[in-house]
Amino acid sequence: MHQDEVKAIFDQQAAGYDTQWAKTAPIKDCLYFLLESLFAELPADARVLCVGVGTGVELAHLAQKNPTWRFTAVEPSGPMLDVCRQRAEKAGFASRCYFHEGYLDSLPATEPHDAGTCFLVSQFILDQQARSEFFREISGKLKSGGILAVSDLASDVESSEYEVLLRAWVNMMAAADISPEGIERIRKAYANDVGVLPPSRVASIIESGGFEPPVQFFQAGLIHAWLSKRAQSSTT
């Protein structure tokens, strides 16, 4: 799926996106709880890059837990970014955010960030070399040794394990009141439009983008998450 097609889908879903996925909040809550510990040693004036920030759920969590951090929110979908900005304004941390509608290649040059998040984003890049270059773009926005938390759907789609996890995932979405038509669209998307790769391959792609070998710190169903540092030798 081309990036413009992905953007169009999220443009359409923005208004009801959080409501649609509300019943899956326990997964996000656990991920963010662990993220707090992983980011605990960042400086009090940390700058955090949120790539593909969507409606800003992880941004809001980090901003509320860390009242002196500053954030760069990058999101190509204008409607999604509008929801993120409204969330920040309502919660009172918008003044600590820079909102960028677009991709990393159009983000104005700024001082490097101490850390970054990239949740359920790179899976939409089907070409593995392009996916590696995407992470290299992120590494170029971080300080040397800056840390990155990544989550993506991951599994060996040829394995029996994938069939078990996919069935459970579909059941979870049904329990979350996603329509049968919506579930079928998601099934087809996972097969054709989402780069679901074995976790070890995703980790290798992250590393090839200028990071130290990632450490997997989370799994819930098909969602896996890794933490890595920008490699000392990484260049922009």
Image: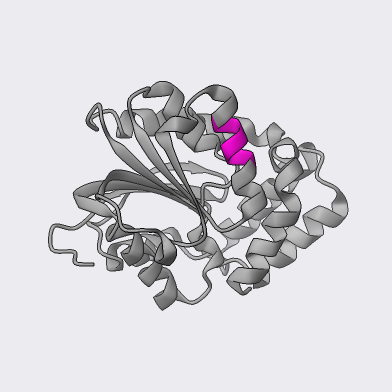
- Residue visible at 22% across and 30% down in the picture: 43
Residue 124 image position (x, y, % from top left): 56, 65
Where is residue 223 shown, x and y percent of the image? 53, 48
Which residue corresponds to the image point at 71% horizontal and 41% vertical from the top-left?
172
Q: In the rendered view, tell whether residue 141 sits above or below residue 67.
A: below
Toward which corner of the image does residue 36 lie, by quadrant? top left
In the image, residue 56 sits, relative to residue 51, either above or below, namely above
Looking at the figure, which quarter contains the C terminus? bottom left
Identify the residue at image location x=80%, y=45%.
Answer: 178
Left or right: 82 with respect to 207? right
**Please, is residue 123 above or below residue 30 in the view?**
below
Q: Which residues are magenta?
A: 83-88
Q: Is residue 119 magenta?
A: no
Taking 191 as reference, is 81 above or below it?
above
* Any part of residue 190 in sight: no
Q: Nearer the viewer, residue 91 or 229?
A: 91
The residue that appears at 53% across and 29% down in the rendered structure is 29
What's the coloring here? one colour
- Quarter occupied by the N terminus: bottom right
Q: Position of residue 177 (x, y in %)?
A: 82, 39
| Dominant secondary structure of the residues highlighted in magenta in the image | helix
